Image (cartoon, helix red, strand yellow):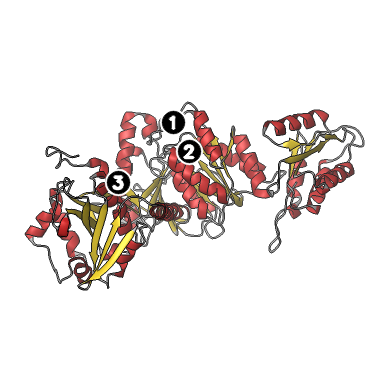
């Protein structure tokens, strides 16, 4: 129960940043007496029709009494929230507690309130009202309100839809030409599902805008070759980016219009046309100026590769918080700072906005890494191994979150969940800021496509650069939560790459029974023990001896695949010496052709220092899915 002494205390914990339906952002906060001019300006920009729907009568302007009433709240019985972009209101919502007969009441008398919205016409359709409803409902529950009532004109179908789609249990009536809606505020399964669906669409869209831009500006491209910005500019250009690319450097000489064959400008504001994403590679002290220019040019998102933020200590952490506030005030999302960059290999995009010197081969694997160094290692391994024993495959998208000041693994999971170009999701996580949400998203994603995770930081401590609080749950507890969510947890980045390549190119086994064969008894026994340790049911290994030929491998694999008592086959191979030793190319073809006979059963090849075997298997291009053909397993 609130006392008279704290009824007017500003509730800062009600402030929140939200992602809207189109992927942009807004800030929701309580309205105060200092907002009078903002409210008047907001109301002037609302159409006459929207004003009529709000007040049920022509209401061209707010009176001084109205302005006072709508900006002075006790934050208990009368609450107003505004959705803002920058310093401007784009939407408002308020509730007034009511008692019997709809009269004003106090907390001790009533648990019902009347609620009303107004959204600026230019921002309607972005999900502003839905986001405001979620937040005002949470505020009302906190203040002891259990029901909302709203009166809406029948022609105001958009607002009626906001209420009816919210998922709360409702009662509707019609009297005196007005639709009256009443609904309880206790969350229901449907209201939570609606909330999660809105969240998923908005967060996925915000990441999609960063990964598939139509125009990119690289800000901080030095005048001389080398340097981070100039390198990323060249990587985007050389990667074949299908959109418009611009170089930005405030120190360019007057009259210089080009840099490395790319249109060049001294400021992003000078670019004639929209810019969807800005890659920021200037020193940290210059970033606020750059962000302000991007905001003025309506840039949608930022990839900040600049360092000098939370990873550098308390001063950098304050600088990072200010960066996020500034970007959000312009409706922009941020990847980074201290990011390695982003990659999208889709043919219609081909974006390598990263420090990776060449575009990875295209494929069906999504990759997320909090650490830039680990991201480099993972990209390198995938590039080197993507043409290995599991066939030719590669990357769909890559995100290096750096300090994870804004866009996180949760956001990327939302994107991957509905991304038709990603079949397998790989994540290197050094910390989990919100285990409950991550587990919920991971469970849903893992039900649709395999999700493989490496936990990089143990003992619950994330790297210094992460602005979000790391989970305090023990490492073993987090591991158990991940397993319960259907996540495949592995221990090393090598395992992460191996699992990703296997899942991207092989069918899932029908059961736990594993046949093992090869030309090394020791490797066969090690494989047998490993299968037992993972809860599988391996058959005794079949030793083909070191004298096994390519034909022997083909025959043994064919028999194992045809045997209905096995659900998967592991082939182990070591180099053999002697005049009749099997060659890498011959062995690769023998395994490939045998596996092709049974395309629904997975085959895993474990090879030890076999020189060209991986390359030979990769060269067997018939293992890759052919256009219009059903895909099968690869050895």
Q: Residue at x 14, y 51 (%)?
A: 105
User: Cα distance, mark 1 to mark 2?
Assistant: 9 Å
Q: Position of residue 588 (x, y in %)?
A: 80, 45
User: Cα distance, mark 1 to mark 3?
Assistant: 25 Å
Mark 3 or mark 2: whose residue is earlier in sequence: 3
Q: Residues within 10 Å of mark 2 (few under 14, many from 20)?
A: many
Quadrant of residue 320 within the rendered picture: top left
Q: Position of residue 186 (x, y in %)?
A: 33, 50
Could you tell me if the residues under marks 1 and 2 are in contact, i.e. CB atoms within 8 Å?
Answer: yes
User: Cα distance, mark 3 to mark 2?
Assistant: 24 Å
Q: Position of residue 136 (x, y in %)?
A: 26, 51
Is any atom of residue 276 visible in this view? yes
List the single residue furthest toward the right: 579
Q: Nearer the viewer, mark 3 or mark 2?
A: 3
State the residue position of label 1: 463
State the residue position of label 2: 370
Q: As rendered, which of 209 and 51 lies closer to the eye?
A: 51
State the residue position of label 3: 16
Mark 1 or mark 2: whose residue is earlier in sequence: 2
Q: Residues within 10 Å of mark 1 (few under 14, many from 20)?
A: some
Local SS, label 1: loop
Q: Residue at x 69, y 46 (%)?
A: 387
């Amino acid at each position: 129960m609130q006392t008279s002494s704290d009824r007017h205390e500003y509730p800062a914990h009600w402030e929140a940043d939200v992602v809207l339906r189109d992927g942009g952002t807004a800030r929701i906060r309580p309205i105060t007496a200092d907002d009078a001019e903002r409210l008047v300006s907001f109301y002037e920009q609302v159409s006459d029709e929207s004003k009529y729907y709000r007040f049920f009568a022509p209401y061209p302007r707010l009176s001084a009494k109205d302005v006072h009433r709508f900006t002075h709240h006790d934050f208990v019985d009368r609450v107003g929230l505004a959705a803002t972009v920058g310093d401007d209101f784009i939407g408002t919502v308020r509730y007034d507690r009511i008692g019997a007969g709809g009269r004003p009441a106090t907390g001790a008398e009533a648990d019902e309130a009347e609620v009303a919205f107004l959204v600026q016409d230019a921002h309607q359709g972005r999900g502003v009202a839905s986001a405001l409803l979620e937040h005002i409902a949470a505020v009302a529950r906190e203040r002891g309100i259990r029901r909302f009532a709203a009166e809406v004109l029948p022609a105001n179908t958009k607002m009626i839809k906001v209420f009816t789609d919210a998922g709360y249990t409702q009662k509707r009536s019609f009297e005196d030409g007005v639709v009256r809606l009443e609904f309880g505020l206790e969350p229901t399964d449907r209201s939570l599902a609606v909330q999660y669906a809105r969240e998923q669409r908005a967060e996925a869209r915000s990441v999609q805008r960063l990964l598939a831009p139509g125009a990119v500006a690289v800000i901080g491209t030095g005048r001389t070759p080398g340097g981070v910005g100039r390198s990323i500019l060249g990587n985007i250009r050389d990667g074949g980016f299908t959109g418009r690319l611009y170089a930005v450097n405030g120190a360019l000489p007057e009259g210089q219009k080009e840099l490395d064959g790319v249109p060049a400008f001294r400021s992003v504001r000078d670019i004639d046309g929209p810019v969807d994403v800005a890659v920021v590679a200037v020193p940290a002290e210059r970033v606020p100026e750059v962000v302000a220019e991007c905001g003025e040019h309506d840039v949608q998102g930022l990839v900040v590769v600049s360092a000098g933020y939370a990873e550098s200590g308390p001063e950098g952490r304050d600088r990072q918080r200010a960066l996020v506030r500034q970007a959000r005030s312009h409706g922009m999302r941020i990847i980074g700072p201290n990011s390695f960059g982003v990659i999208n290999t889709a043919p219609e995009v081909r974006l390598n906005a990263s420090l990776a010197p060449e575009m990875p081969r295209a494929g069906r694997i999504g990759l997320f890494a909090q650490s830039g160094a680990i991201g480099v290692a993972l990209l390198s391994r995938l590039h080197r191994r993507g043409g290995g024993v599991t066939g030719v495959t590669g990357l769909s998208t890559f995100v290096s979150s750096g300090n994870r000041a804004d866009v996180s693994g949760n956001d990327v999971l939302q994107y991957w969940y509905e991304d038709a170009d990603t079949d397998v999701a790989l994540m290197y996580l050094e910390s989990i800021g919100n285990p409950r949400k991550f587990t919920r998203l991971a469970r849903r994603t893992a039900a649709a496509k395999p999700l493989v995770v490496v936990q990089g930081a143990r003992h619950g401590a994330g790297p210094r650069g992460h602005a979000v609080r790391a989970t305090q749950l023990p490492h073993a507890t987090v591991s158990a939560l991940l397993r319960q969510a259907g996540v495949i947890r592995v221990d090393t980045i090598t395992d992460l790459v191996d699992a990703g390549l296997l899942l991207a190119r092989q069918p899932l086994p029908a059961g736990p029974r594993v046949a093992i064969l090869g030309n090394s008894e020791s490797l066969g026994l090690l494989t047998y023990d490993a299968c037992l340790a993972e809860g599988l049911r391996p058959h005794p290994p079949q030793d083909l001896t070191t004298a096994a030929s390519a034909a022997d491998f083909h025959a043994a694999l064919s028999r194992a695949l045809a045997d209905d008592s096995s659900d998967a086959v592991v082939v182990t191979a070591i180099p053999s010496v002697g005049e009749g030793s099997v060659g890498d190319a011959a062995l690769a073809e023998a395994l490939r052709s045998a596996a092709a006979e049974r395309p629904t059963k997975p085959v895993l090849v474990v090879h030890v220092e076999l020189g060209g075997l991986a390359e030979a298997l990769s060269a067997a291009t018939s293992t890759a899915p052919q256009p219009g053909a059903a895909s099968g397993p690869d050895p």
